[in-house]
Amino acid sequence: MIISFAWTTDAFKAGRKSRTRRQWQDKYAKIFLNGIEKGKVHDAYDRQPRFGGKKIGELIITSMKKEHMSKMPDEDYEREGFKFMEENNIEIWKMNPRDAFEDWRKDDSTPWIVDFKRV
């Protein structure tokens, strides 16, 4: 399976991203959930291959859960790669990383939170 990191490619490649939030349907997420116990390796791409994406690494998902965006903890600024982007003057969604992160927290959704480690 493939997970793309279009907005946070640089943070992923630098090893400064270990969590991602996904608006996956539960049925689709279960495919990934089933691979956790087996230590399944997934491909990381800079964007979906159908849009010309290239493989940038591999990862193993260590845990997954659903949680409302308003509960996103401060430490996810680092886990999601925003701190790396701030340190390297990289914008996300045409915003500085801190503003983007705080704006993201206001989203009224309950995505899948995917923790992973690079391999």
Image (tube, rainbow, N blue to C red):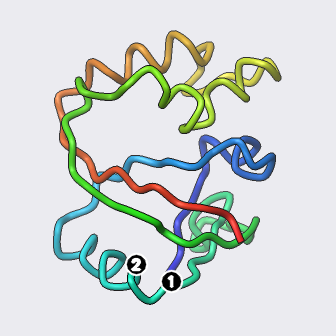
- Residue 7 marker: none
Viewed as shown, does residue 48 lie left or right of 68? right
Q: Residue furthest bottom?
A: 38
Viewed as shown, does residue 50 lie left or right of 16? left
- Look at mark 2 in the image and give the residue it sits on: 36
Residue shown at 70%/42% (left/top)? Answer: 16
Viewed as shown, does residue 76 lie left or right of 87? left
Residue shown at 67%/22% (left/top)? Answer: 91
- Look at mark 1 in the image and give the residue it sits on: 39
Q: Is residue 72 above or below residue 40?
A: above
Dot 1 surroundings within 10 Å: few (below 14), some, or many (20 or more)? few
Kind of residue indicated by mark 1? Gly
Viewed as shown, does residue 20 lie left or right of 119? left
Residue shown at 49%/81% (left/top)? Answer: 1
Instruction: Give the camera-side residue of 16 and 103.
Output: 16
Could you say where residue 104 lies in the image, as x and y percent from the top left? 37, 24
* Kind of element beneath mark 2: helix
Dot 2 surroundings within 10 Å: few (below 14), some, or many (20 or more)? some
Are the residues at dot 2 and dot 1 in contact (C-beta closer than 8 Å)? yes
Q: Is residue 65 above or below residue 34?
A: above
Could you say where residue 112 lies in the image, as x and y percent from the top left? 29, 53
Instruction: Give the camera-side residue of 61 and 107.
Output: 61
Q: State the count of labels.
A: 2
The alpha-carbon separation of the residues under discs 2 and 1 comes to 5 Å
Q: Quarter of the image containing the C terminus? A: bottom right
Q: Is residue 59 above or below residue 23?
A: below
Kind of residue indicated by mark 2? Ile
* Kind of element beneath mark 1: loop
Could you say where residue 84 lies in the image, as x and y percent from the top left? 73, 29
Instruction: Give the camera-side residue of 90 and 67.
Output: 67
Could you say where residue 28 lies in the image, as x and y percent from the top left? 26, 74
Residue shown at 70%/50% (left/top)? Answer: 12
